Amino acid sequence: MFSEHFKKAVIDYRYLMNRNYPKKSTIKLVGDKYRLSRQERSILYRGISDSKTALERRSKVVREIVQGPVYIDTYNVMFVMANYILGRSVYLSDDGVLRDAGEMHGRFSNKKILQRIQEILEEFVSGKVGLTFRFILDEPVSNSGRLSAELNAFFRQHRLEAEARTMASPDYFLSQIVKGTVCSGDSVIMDNTGAQIFDLPLYLLTKHFDIQPPVLNELR
């Protein structure tokens, strides 16, 4: 997936991050030097962390959910999965979680794919008896109310210990969680939550699509 000039850019960018260079100006410096595309710059920005930050985030990541309640950053999870299904670039970041270079920013119109992902999430919750789930949705994103209602209807029908709710600021709410498990690859949430982190997109895409993403941490 990665070109030789991008691999060199990763090495330079990580070197500068480890020496506390400003992130945005470093992206421009390295990106211009290696003539990176917009997508490649996005991967650098979202996928490469300084070694200390990457290690701290990795220390929170677990391979399976053993502690509830489970809080799901719903759109973060759905959009990573949607980008993969659409054939867009996904990769394992330095901090150990799956991210994408799709840059949807809360906009996605392929209802068929979103419906399929919703069904996968519902199936996942149905198979985790004994755990409590909280699906958190961004209120400003269009159709959040509808998706929340549909999820809750499914949970009630199948008598599951789960609920969906919309919030104006899910990132702030999830960042304050201190117990249980948070399913999110958002860097701010990962840095601030005291809970365990579970990479739900990676788990579900591996199970349903046998995904084998490239690993940025191997580029050194």
Image (cartoon, grey):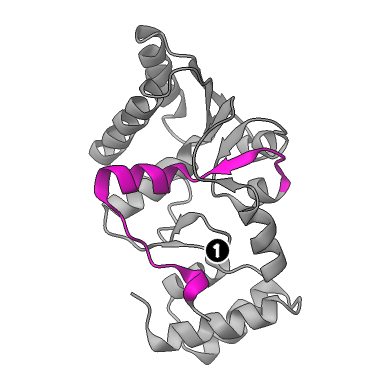
Please name the residue that numbered disc 1 is placed on.
Answer: 46
Report the front residue among 156 and 140.
156
> Which stretch appears magenta?
192-218
Rendered view: 201 above or below 95: above
Quadrant of the snapshot with the N terminus: bottom left
Rendered view: 10 above or below 207: below
Q: Is residue 46 visible?
A: yes
At 46% across and 55% down in the image, what residue appears? 98
Q: Does residue 209 appear to the left or right of 66 in the view shown?
A: left
Rendered view: 165 above or below 106: above
User: What is the count of numbered marks?
Assistant: 1
Q: Is residue 79 visible?
A: no
Q: Does residue 196 appear to the left or right of 155 in the view shown?
A: right
> In the rendered image, which quarter is residue 174 located in?
top right
At 65% across and 82% down in the image, what residue appears? 15
- Picture coordinates of residue 147, whole percent (x, y): 40, 25
> In the rendered image, which quarter is residue 39 located in?
bottom left
At 55% across and 26% down in the image, what residue appears? 166
- Magenta stretch: includes residue 172: no
Structural crowding at the residue carrying mark 1, measured as other residues with C-alpha within 10 Å and reported as few (<14), some (14–19) or many (≥20): some
> In the rendered image, which quarter is residue 154 located in?
top left
Query: Which secondary structure, mark 1?
Result: helix
- Picture coordinates of residue 177, whole percent (x, y): 70, 33
At 28% across and 32% down in the image, what residue appears? 115
Residue farthest to the right? 20
- Picture coordinates of residue 60, whole percent (x, y): 64, 48
- Magenta stretch: includes residue 214: yes
What's the amino acid at mark 1? Arg
Residue farthest to the left? 112
Rendered view: 78 above or below 34: above
- Picture coordinates of residue 197, whole percent (x, y): 58, 43
Residue farthest to the bottom? 33
